[in-house]
Image: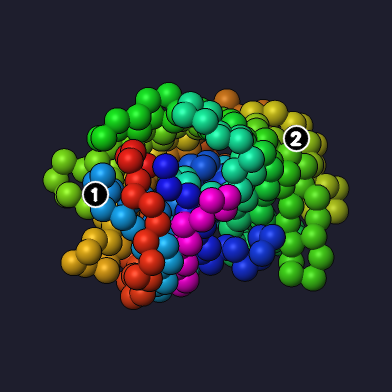
Amino acid sequence: MERAFFVGIFAAFLIGHGPCAFAQTGGRGPATQNSVNTLNVTNIRNTTDDQALPKLELGLGASGVFINDYPGSNQQHYVWLPIPYLVYRGNFLRADQNGDMRGVFLQNAEIDIDASASGSVPVNSNLDQAREGMPNLDWMGEVGPRLLVHIYRSSKYSLEASVPVRWVFSTDLTRIDDRGFDFNPEIYLRRRAWFDPHGTVLAYYGALWGTSQLTRYFYEVSPQYATADRPVYSAVPGYMYDYVGFEYHHTSSPTSPLIMFVGVSESFLAGAANRLSPLMLSIENQEVIAGFIYDFYRSKEKAPPNQEFE
């Protein structure tokens, strides 16, 4: 199976998926804030046994995302991001189908153990009515180990379960703050698109739990920020939300350098541990993402041909 190292725009502030990018920064799930996971939609390759992919690819594109300000927010906004695109198919570093930039420590036919990272964009609290007057939500990222179980693979289908535990941090680009840990199991099914020989359809389901540092960051209301409509609230650790989503990816081909992607997802917060927080005003959040990448350079040197559907 090919290894790929993929650097997208979030690599600039991560250590060199998913909390600001609300659920789907992909693994499909958070990062934990408002999910802008442009990484996850550009690295699915459909290959035949006799087709070797370039070892190095370079490209440039853009994506637009319509998202909630944070999990449980009742306000949404658009985010537009450029997408620098770099793929290097090596032996250790890769970007998997979820958009995670990761290094593989142990791999066999059924199980991978790896480390992965993802990240997302900030939120200006003065533009969100529920958080007005409170501190902004900074850039956020997460990194940690993951167990990836390959449940089923064929030339057309791939079914996998992902079980990551990640350290979450936020940064205003002058300092880094600890935001605890999250646990984000998910399962996803990929299928070669029946209507597009260079397309892939992805369906996924996941859930998120957070430690007290993380849930306080989103849902705590300290006395100095309390108002008549926003009473004091002490957030507790635990279940944050679950989510379901669908994506379609059209990958580049030997005759076309264009990569396109579109996706929708829905998150459900009715059973959240902090459902009573005055900052949780919506029990369902939606996300829509679309974009393109122009793959303008492919090296003549080839990576070993892939024998499996990624």
What residue is rendered at 85% in x and 53% in y?
224
Indicate the position of residue 68 as horizontal and vertical percent values: 51, 52
> Badge 2 is on which residue?
211
State whether residue 129 is above or below residue 294: above
Mark 1 and 2 residues: CB-CB less than 8 Å, in contact? no
Say which of marks 1 and 2 sits in front. 1
Indicate the position of residue 34 as horizontal and vertical percent values: 55, 52
Q: Quadrant of the C terminus?
A: top left
Question: What amino acid type is highlighted by mark number 2?
Answer: Thr
Query: What secondary structure is the magenta-colored segment mainly?
Result: strand
Asked which secondary structure carries label 1, the reply is loop
Question: What amino acid type is highlighted by mark number 1?
Answer: Asp
Q: Residues within 10 Å of mark 2 (few under 14, many from 20)?
A: some
**44 left or right of 77 in image:** left
What residue is rendered at 64% in x and 44% in y?
115
Residue 171 is at least partly visible in this image:
yes
Q: Which of the two discs, 1 and 2, labels the residue nearer the N terminus?
A: 1
What residue is rendered at 83% in x and 47% in y?
222
* Observer-nearest of 235 and 9: 9
Indicate the position of residue 250 as horizontal and vertical percent values: 26, 55
Residue 166's tag is: none
> Badge 1 is on which residue?
50
Indicate the position of residue 303 as horizontal and vertical percent values: 40, 57
**162 left or right of 191 in image:** right
What residue is rendered at 37% in x and 61% in y?
302
Q: Which stretch did the figure color magenta?
A: 82-95
Q: CA distance from mark 1 to mark 2?
A: 48 Å
* Observer-nearest of 153 and 139: 153
